[in-house]
Amino acid sequence: MTIETTETTTADAAAGRPLLDVRDLTVTYASGAAAVRGVDLSVAAGQKLGVAGESGCGKSTLALALLRLLPAGTKVTGEVLLDGEDVLTMKWGRVRAVRWAGASVVFQGAMHSLNAVHRIGDQIAEPILLHKKATPAGAKKKARELLEHVGLPGARADAYPHELSGGQRQRVMIAMALACDPRLIIADEPTTALDVMIQAQILRLIEQLVAEQDLGLIMISHDLAVLSDTCDRLAVMYAGRVVEEGPAQEVYERARHPYGKALSAAFPRIGDLSSRFAPRGLPGDPPDPSALPSGCTFHPRCPEAIDACTTDDQTLRVAGPVHRAACVHVGVPEPSAPGVEGAP
Ligand SMILES: Nc1ncnc2c1ncn2[C@@H]1O[C@H](COP(=O)(O)OP(=O)(O)O)[C@@H](O)[C@H]1O
Ligand code: SF4
Ligand SMILES: [Mg+2]
């Protein structure tokens, strides 16, 4: 399979810029829902960033905004620099090219994303024909190679989506995402609909492809345990904001934001029987983005809230050398978090 990443990767490294650099991204739906608010994040080639948060925290909106896939009437501000080029201000022709060859998305629920009446090989070949200007025979050959690359026999190219299992269909989605040799993969809950064994296989496949091809990866999930296992860094979103970010294992094991702590405690840990039998939950739901609470938006659910939290909003504060959290309690040494550097 042709991988055409080396030149640009070298140029990026020389320029010292990340593959993806998102600055102050804000998304407001036509309904007035402020689903993403002032998000900054970056991903380097070969880096895996996990984005965590409960349902409704703005993860998918963020993913869709990166490739301008949001519905008409949605207001998007900020910058989405892919290889230094702002996706938000590109001409539409360029955006279409970037959606395949720059960055591509793997969505949850492959059955809904695949066309039921077309053979999967033809569906994978379509973007190759369009964006790589391949011949029909060349595109067909590459579609088979891609299927083999994601662990399916090339002959399955002739199958229709309903003839494959859920895990096989998700592999097809990954093959399709790789069709035009993108540099960044955005995987939005790619394994949520799959059983645990298949989930593990798909996660290992994504990890392997990212490593082999030096891709950047944004992996979105509500499951902090899966993300900490797969990713290098983690960003935790709440009410459209990144409220905590840092090295994946550190955020999972020693979260500093009360929401990060609750999310982490909600998943049982291997070897910890007490958490398996009594996983701790967090009462309530994330707020409606059309009617956000005052102050820190987490205060109505926060077990550590103080009076000031109802009026004072928090931005990210230093929680360690490469760990930040948006909480009034962060910025002083925290005895319950051994190993995390005390912040100034
Ligand atoms: N097309 C839309 N119009 C208005 N509000 C939307 C739309 N899509 C999502 N939302 C709202 O934006 C918020 C974030 O949604 P979403 O990005 O799907 O969150 P997540 O992926 O974290 O579950 C939710 O409150 C959701 O109801
Ligand atoms: S700022 Fe206050 S409400 Fe927000 S997370 Fe920290 S303690 Fe809780
Ligand atoms: Mg979602």
Image: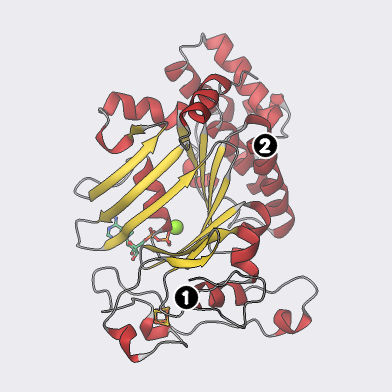
Say left or right for 196 vs 340: right
Q: Residues within 10 Å of mark 2 (few under 14, many from 20)?
A: some
Ligand 1 resides in the quarter of the picture at bottom left
The residue that mark 2 highlights is 211
Q: Is residue 174 left or right of residue 153?
A: left
Is the distance from the Cβ of mark 1 to the nearest ligand 2 atom less than 8 Å? yes
Question: In the rendered image, is residue 21 in sight?
Answer: yes
Q: Residue furthest front?
A: 344
Outermost residue, right side:
271
Specify few, some or many for label 1: CA neighbours under 10 Å numbering under 14, 14-19, or 20 or more: many
- Mark 2 belongs to which amino acid? Ala
Q: Estimate the x, y position of residue 205 in percent, counting from the top left.
A: 69, 41
Specify which label sits upstream in the sequence, 2 or 1.
2
Q: Which residue is mark 1?
A: 330
| Quadrant position of the N terminus in the picture | top right
Q: Mark number for residue 79?
A: none
